Amino acid sequence: ITQAIARDCLADAMLALDEAGIEQLFTVHDEIITEVPFEKATLKDVEAIMGRSLPWAPDLPLRGDGFETRYYMKEID
């Protein structure tokens, strides 16, 4: 059940990013990889969209951590 709900949260975030015009390149497990011009949106904007409460689980705390990089990498040390 936990993985299914996490997937639903990710899918809702993907729809919200799409509605905001944020281009999504691909996903890896629980990550959404985007390509966004700096003048269109900031990392904070993307994190805010992904952290919005869900209509079907308004009390579920959501938060995503992201980072900016020129190429895909799993994490920054």
Image (cartoon, rainbow, N blue to C red):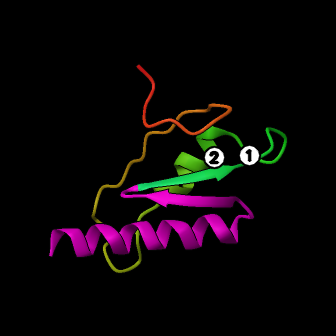
Please tell me which residue is depicted at 24% across the width and 75% down the height of the picture.
Answer: 4
- The CA distance from mark 1 to mark 2 is 6 Å
| Disc 1 to disc 2: CB gap under 8 Å | yes
Image x and y of residue 53, in percent: 41, 64
Image x and y of residue 40, in percent: 81, 48
Image x and y of residue 28, in percent: 43, 56
Read off the residue under disc 1: 41
Read off the residue under disc 2: 45
Is 29 colored magenta in this rendering? yes
Front residue (pair 47, 70) = 70
Please tell me which residue is depicted at 26% across the width and 73% down the height of the picture.
Answer: 5
Q: Quadrant of residue 75?
A: top left
Q: Quadrant of residue 16?
A: bottom right
Q: In the displayed image of the protein, which residue is found farthest to the left?
A: 1
Front residue (pair 40, 73) = 73
Q: Which residues are magenta?
A: 1-30
Is 75 colored magenta in this rendering? no
Mark 1: secondary structure: loop
Q: Does residue 1 lie above or below 34 as drawn?
A: below
* Three-letter residue code for mark 1: Ala
Secondary structure mostly taken by the magenta-highlighted segment of the chain: helix
Relative to 22, 11 lies left or right: left
Please tell me which residue is depicted at 43% across the width and 40% down the height of the picture.
Answer: 65
Residue 59 seen in the figure? yes
Relative to 55, 66 lies left or right: right
Query: Which quadrant: the C terminus?
Result: top left
Relative to 53, 49 lies left or right: right
Residue 58 seen in the figure? no
